[in-house]
Image: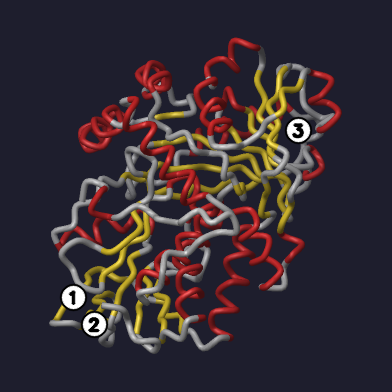
Amino acid sequence: MAAPSNARVAVVGAGIVGTSIALALRKRGAQVTLVDRDEPGRGCSFGNSGAISPGSVAPLALPGVLASVPGMLLDDESPLYLPLRYLPRALPWLARFVASARPRTVQASARKLATIHAGAIAAHEAMTRELGVPELFLQRGHLHLYPDAQALAKDATGWRMREAYGFRSERLDRAGILALEPNVGERYQLGMYLADHATILNPFRYVQAMARAFTAAGGRIERASVSRLLQAGAQWSLQGSGGSGPGYDHVVVAAGAWSKELLAPLGIQLALESQRGYHLQFEGGRDAVSRTVVLADRKVFVTPMEGGLRVGGTVEIGGLAAPPDPRRAAVLGRIARETFRGLATLPTRSWMGHRPCMPDSVPVVGAAPGRANLWIATGHGHLGLTDSLNTAQWIAAALFGEPPARDATGVELAATCASQQGI
């Protein structure tokens, strides 16, 4: 049943996804409380690479990727690392990850990802203007770099999938790379350029601007840890550090990698794992690149941020509790200094955050099965920024019983139903 226009809604999680949802619901008249233990944007949204990447339709689990996984898992300098201590806990997720590489599953995942990505660039450009921060939106494309043709061939499946979904790329030789990015080192001889892709130059400031717009429109932000969701009839309440919260008509769980443990007591088992990501930000050096540059062979994103040059990447499957591993950030720094001139003497600061990832790379967005008025929006993995606004429109439309949101091309933003994601 559709919610009344003034429904009381709690959104748990104030990252880019949760804050986008809160704003979309408030615009429709709902009485919305956005709840997080920290200020909006301080989690994974703080440290991401800012890429708006609708061409990322290939899931992480591809047959070719699986062949290289065993060798990477135990190499602490590889793009993918799994500490031995965490292997027993990770095995169920890894088994699902391997199963997701079946050709039929890969194609299904790509279709879902393309749908939820649709119109993302235009949506974010419009949102930055609406929030009064248009300077955060940079549309100079994304440049993916490879040492040679053999390295590029390893990613051939992903580039074919992009092309199949209408994303056009240009193959560049060394001269073409230097014409766009003259500071790229000799290691990289081939490039693939997606000219229409975009970047947010300060993801944290973007979320903060969104949160200010939310409160200016009458929304409420509450700093509290939520440990449990309680249902009594048609009402929900939040239990945490401040005790049980007031009754809500609806709850949206957008708590990123923490969504799994929040939903489990309700009998909702998410196949969700944290892929711990790191960045090293050089204070200065922003002019080393003029757009998002992907060192594809090393799975490293290099971005000109407002505060300097951000070098992000790596996947560490190590759970929510372990402290950051400084070696992971150090690897990113070494790669950046090897690739770009002028970084050797610049000070740096490092960061680690938890990307919420599903085995098939498809986020869980929709009504929770068997639980009235409970909604789930998590599992966006590496694409939370890209998909945040579309996720928000889909949740808001579904909650209020509106027709599914559509982008300018008429593509239905039919986000993935939770019941289809192994819950």
Instruction: Determine the residue positioned at 49% across, 28% down.
Output: 79
Residue 102 image point, x, y percent: 31, 26
Residue 244's disc is 2
| Mark sitting earlier along the chain (3/1) | 1
Residue 411 at x, y percent in the picture: 50, 53
Task: Using the image as rendered, state which of residue 99 and residue 3 is in the foreground.
Answer: 3
The amino acid type, in three-letter code, at marker 2 is Ser
Q: Judge left or right: residue 130 versus residue 245.
A: right
Q: At x 37% / y 31%, what residue is drawn?
A: 106
- Tell me whether the residue at label 2 lies in contact with that at label 1, contact meaning CB atoms closer than 8 angstroms: yes
* Label 3 vs 2, first from the N-terminus: 2
Q: How would you rate the neighbour count of disc 2 (Cα within 10 Å): few for under 14, some for 14-19, many for 20 or more?
A: some
Q: CA distance from mark 3 to mark 2?
A: 51 Å
Left or right of 239 in this view: 354 = right
What crowding class fits label 3: few (fewer than 14 Cα within 10 Å), some (14-19), or many (20 or more)?
A: some
- The residue lying furthest to the top in this view is 150
Give the structural element (helix, strand or loop) at label 3.
loop
Q: Residue visible at 37% across and 56% down? A: 378
Under circle 2, the secondary element is strand
Q: Check disc 3 and report the residue beneath it.
A: 344
Q: Amino acid at mark 1?
A: Leu
Locate residue 241: give its quadrant. bottom left
Cα separation, mark 2 vs mark 1, equals 9 Å
